[in-house]
Amino acid sequence: MSAIWAIVRKDLRAYYLKPPLISWAIIMPIVLVLAFYLRHPEGIGDLLPGLVAMTVLFGATSMEGIVFTFEKRIGALERLLLAPVSLRQVLMGKVLGGTLFGAATGIAMLLIGMLGFGVSGPRWEIALPVIVLSSFALSCMAMALVAGVREVFEAMTLFNYFRFPMVFLCGVFVPVAAMALPLRVVAYVLPLTYVVDGLGGAFPARSGLFSPGLDLLILGGYSAVFLLCAELVLKRSVRREG
Amino acid sequence: MGAAIVMESLRKQYGDLVAVDGLSLEVEQGEVFGLLGPNGAGKTTTIRMLVGLTEPDGGRAAVNGFDVIREPVKMKAGVGVVPELSNLYPELTCLDNLLYTAELYGVPRRERLARSEALLEQVGLTNRRDAGFGKLSRGMKRRLTIAAALVHRPAVLFLDEPTTGLDVFSARSLRGLVRELNAGGTTIVLTTHLIAEADELCHRIGLLVKGRLLALDSPAALKSRVAAEQRLWVELESEPPATALEQLAAVPSLSLAETAGNRLLLAATDVHAALRDVVAWSVNHGLRIRHLATQPPTLEEAFVRLTGIDADVMTVDKPQKPAGGG
């Protein structure tokens, strides 16, 4: 555990807590929510769970992908692989950095929606676990995608193959229940669906497709699968590049 | 003393290229062992297999008694590695880099600061304690990378091409540090393509070419293998005529290796006989000797003779990887 926290603290200090990133984490949600508010002020309350989910998605994946590929490229990742730390601990340390950043941006979005645009607050006992576990699952997904690549641009391109379809298919703007059956089937396979659904369930005026407990369980399952994939991909990548 | 490192038929292949081909050897505790070979000989791949970064395709290896495949975490706890690339974190200060490494290696919290500060002093970077790693010169980065490899007091230290790309003074100071660490009991394994460096630092040297171990011995013993033939430098006061050179070439005790004006390089198996014959030859032709010297074989000659590789190949530096670590 000590090694995992050492990696998390180092990443927070070296990358995530730098002023430009903190300001991005605040400005990005403000711009997003403001854009949708100006277009349709009355509907912002309905859109907020989707916007929080989208913010968590981009917050949990972008910086983690940059940090991981940057360290791989300069050889610093190799230092972790040389240390008496298992591959799983290394990955967990890296993933938790992304998780904390993703969760912080998601919570910032929620607070901006509530305090700045008058949206009524969620049930925090549901919203907080959903945001944190969502951020963890999406960080694990990002790690599974970047574990095998070396360049930042490769990571970003790969992310976008998954992120943008998810934004349109997972109920961020259009409810999954209102989609055609083939699209609904695809939506059920994508993790962001359960993030949006779980967050929807946290707001009193809305109800999700599934109970928040089931959403959390599914997100936990996704986390385990993605982490396992990341471990396999990184092991193969180290063997190939070694 | 027992073996710090054991390799048995270690093998690694990338596609059709066999990088390491059935390498078997032992490195004793407290030894400075050098893997010497041209670029692409398999030195770095061997080190990477020993430190758990690359999985061997065959054979086995153990460091400090721990199998590198089956017990990688235990093995890594007793090993320090200085990769060819100085790869600490550019965003962290020198001190923070050492503190972070100490934490990763499980150094108790109360000891981390004292050890890190002592190491900064040992590598001469106390005055750069709070400078970012990214802001250091190449030599300083190298020294801090070595300090980071020592923070958990490893029993075995691996140095991959330690002086590549360093200026003369930094390289010399680094060689001094290696000797100092070895005197303190650390087993050191270094890879190098610099013959003089291996000669100066290593107790034993393994000559590696195309993944195969061609010779394994102390520098002195390797030189003595080619000592059967010694070099004789002769400088005359004037250039000898061609007929005189023809007669010299026909003398049975020596062979004429090179001529350049009034300077001759001779090879001789019996130095005593060769000296007598050269002096007689010069007197017969009315040539005065200005300078005469015998030259024992160098490690470079031993390398060339044992591997069949031109020594010039060894002076070509590896291309540097594009990275920020320097």
Image (tube, coloured by chain):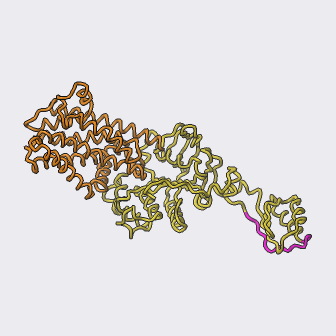
Q: Is residue B60 magenta?
A: no
- Look at the picture and state if A207 lies above or below B101: above
Who is closer to the viewer here, B279 or A132? A132
Instruction: Please tell me whether residue B289 belongs to the stretch shown in magenta.
Output: yes
* In-front residue for pair A73/A27: A27
Looking at the image, residue A14 lies above or below residue B12: below
Count the numbered circles shown.
Answer: 0
**Residue A157, image x, y percentages:** 35, 43
Residue at left 35%, top 36%? A229
Measuring from the top left, give residue A39's x and y in whole percent.
14, 44
The residue under the point 80% across, 66% down is: B264
Left/right of residue B172 with respect to residue A129 in the rendered view: right
Rendered image quadrant of residue A20: bottom left
Q: Furthest-top residue in view?
A: A181
Residue placed farthest to the front in the image? A39
Q: Does residue A13 appear left or right of residue A115 in this picture? A: right
Query: Which residue occupies the foreground of this view, B76 or B146?
Result: B146
Tell me which chain appears yellow.
Answer: B
Percent across and percent down for residue A68 are 36, 48
Q: Which residues are magenta?
A: B283-295
For chain A, the rendered hue is orange
Quarter occupied by residue B15: top right
Picture quadrant of residue A52: top left
Residue B157 seen in the current view = no
